[in-house]
Amino acid sequence: MKLFNQSFQNLEQSLHYATTKNSVISNNLANVDTPNYKAQEVTFKSMLEGELSLHVTKNKHIRSNGIATPYKVMNQNRTSYTHSGNNVDVDKEMTELAKNQIYYRGAIDRLNGKFGLLHTVIRGGK
């Protein structure tokens, strides 16, 4: 019997996505002046490749803890905004950071609501 339903796993996956995206954006902003640095972005690989799980092809690969990652970090190699070859757009990154913070906060609020509901059930509706 599963203690938590699929919505908890979906919320956990959402938090992993938001954390990864925040890390990628922070890395892009930290390298805004690095010559030839190519910005990275987080994309949904399930939409791109139709996959929902990690593939382990060697014994030394890190195995998933049962949570599939439907997103992937990719380099943006097609553009160059400066003469140094760097393609980090600070305005775009800051906009993405703000959107990601809203997304993360929404996922946290939803998760808190789920735990609040469980707490109410455990207390017997009181």
Image (tube, helix red, strand yellow):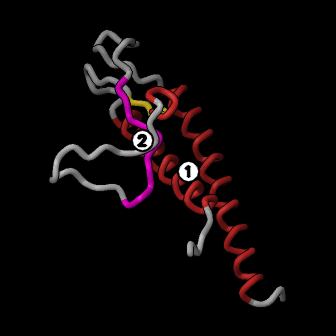
Up the image or down, 112 lies above or below 24; here it is below
* Residue at image coords 43%, 31%: 41
In the picture provided, is 77 more to the left or to the right than 100?
left
In the image, residue 81 lies at what x, y percent?
Answer: 40, 13
* Residue at image coords 46%, 23%: 89
The magenta stretch spans which residues? 65-75
- Seen as rendered, the residue at the extreme right is 126
Q: Is residue 20 magenta?
A: no
Q: Secondary structure at mark 2?
A: helix
Q: Which residue is mark 1?
A: 14
- Compare residues 36 and 124 and report the one nearer the observer: 124
- Seen as rendered, the residue at the extreme front is 1
Q: Quadrant of the C terminus?
A: bottom right
* Quadrant housing residue 6: bottom right
In the picture provided, is 106 more to the left or to the right than 45?
right
Q: Quadrant of the N terminus?
A: bottom right
Other-residue count near label 1 (Cα within 10 Å), few / some / many at <14 / 14–19 / ≥20: some
Amino acid type of the residue that numbered disc 2 sits on in the rendered structure:
Ser
* Quadrant housing residue 78: top left
Up the image or down, 115 lies above or below 76; here it is below
On residue 26, the disc is 2
- Compare residues 114 and 29 and report the one nearer the observer: 114
